[in-house]
Amino acid sequence: MLSAFRTAALCCRRAGHGYKPSTLRLLRRNQGTIAAESGATSGSAIVPNAASNRLVGRWLVGCSGLVVGAVVLGGVTRLTESGLSMVDWHLVREMKPPQTQEEWEEEFSKYQQFPEFKILNHSMTLPEFKFIFYMEWGHRMWGRLVGLSYILPAIYFWRKGYFTRSMKGKVLGLCGFVFFQGLLGWYMVKSGLEEKPESHDIPRVSQYRLCAHLGSALLLYCASLWTGLTLLQSPQKLVETKNVMLLRKFAKGTGILVFLTALSGAFVAGLDAGLVYNSFPKMGERWIPDDLLAFSPTLKNVFENPTTVQFDHRILGISTLAAITGLYLFSRKVMLPKRAKMAISLLTAMAYGQVALGISTLLLYVPTPLAATHQSGSLALLSLAIWVLAELRKVPK
């Protein structure tokens, strides 16, 4: 059929008459349509277009949602002190939990050989062990689900030709980061299984490795959500005034501050720093506690002194709230599209809610449900900050 249209068109050109211009246009249009259909049926790669971009964007936003689940589940695992219940790591073999009584007793006996059982949980029963085991097992299985949700669709979309050259590099980076995140998780757990120099030291994972594990998850989340949003939402056409450019810079700085505040929460969790001063706004009877710089050298306090870690998290939280409030007030002076205004307003409301959650968690001595909600709130705040940046981004030339 395609050759017939080509022949007809050639005859028209040679004759120079006999067909109206509208008929010639119809022939050319049908020729192009059939060529496209012929290419599609032949199994050739599809050129990325608006429809394929929307599909890839939805996939990446969905993946970012699964990363949120992994972070929240990891936080609950940490809060219930379940993270050290699985003392080895196997990519496939551990996907099936113990089934029989013998298998459970064997797994429990492995756990009993490590410091957490010897120092903290020496009176733990098998049913209690099953609870913490399933918490850690669920977190690991969710991590594998995240990995598959990135890798399998990426292979499919790649073969279908849905990725541009630049998108291929981004997707490879995201998939590689997922693999790195899994290795980093086990590297973190190993730090809690090692014997401490002092026999009375509380077994816990390294706060540095915990921060790296959380930080890499947050980076993966931010990259996935940002890429997905930029594919799903066309950039807003903003008049590039001085105030708009200042607002964009202000939003970027605020987003970085939100990220750093969330990251500092890893040190709070790793050192149980939320339990050292359970008062607000003062820390005990003072604005600045006496043991703020108790460690030597001074820099060591920032990462290893629970008092300093809590103090820093408070300062970062209050600074983030102030920055977001300033962003909101400044945005009122700028002509923005409705969607951008909504994003900034929701970010501001969430910031006040997150601070209220943090203070409540502190005053109530870190109850697990409230602490988990506070951690989830940090992800919601980070999501809204990314949305604001996506709405304010420049239109590509």
Image (tube, rainbow, N blue to C red):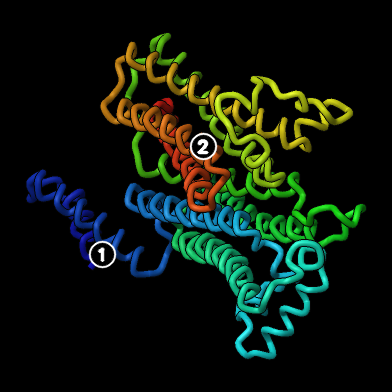
Which residue lies most toward the front here? 285
Res 391 visible: yes
Which residue lies most toward the right here? 197
Q: Name the element at disc 2.
A: helix
Residue at left 63%, top 83%? 98
In this rendering, the answer to whether 276 lies above or below 18 is above
State left or right for residue 307 relative to residue 248: right
Which residue lies most toward the top here? 242
Callout 1, which amino acid?
Answer: Leu
Callout 2, which amino acid?
Answer: Gly
State left or right for residue 111 relative to residue 233: right
Identify the image quadrant of the N terminus: bottom left
Percent of width and height locating residue 296: 88, 29
In this rendering, the answer to whether 215 lies above or below 130 is above
Percent of width and height locating residue 198: 91, 53
Res 397 visible: no
Near-viewer residue (108 or 136) = 108
Identify the image quadrant of the C terminus: top left
Instruction: Give the label, 1 or 2, closer to the camera.
Output: 2
Give neighbour class at mark 2: few <14, some 14-19, many 20+ (Cα, 10 Å).
many
Q: In the rendered image, which residue does mark 2 sit on?
A: 358
Residue at left 63%, top 40%? 274
Near-viewer residue (381 or 271) = 271
Percent of width and height locating residue 96: 60, 81
Q: In the rendered image, which residue does mark 1 sit on?
A: 2
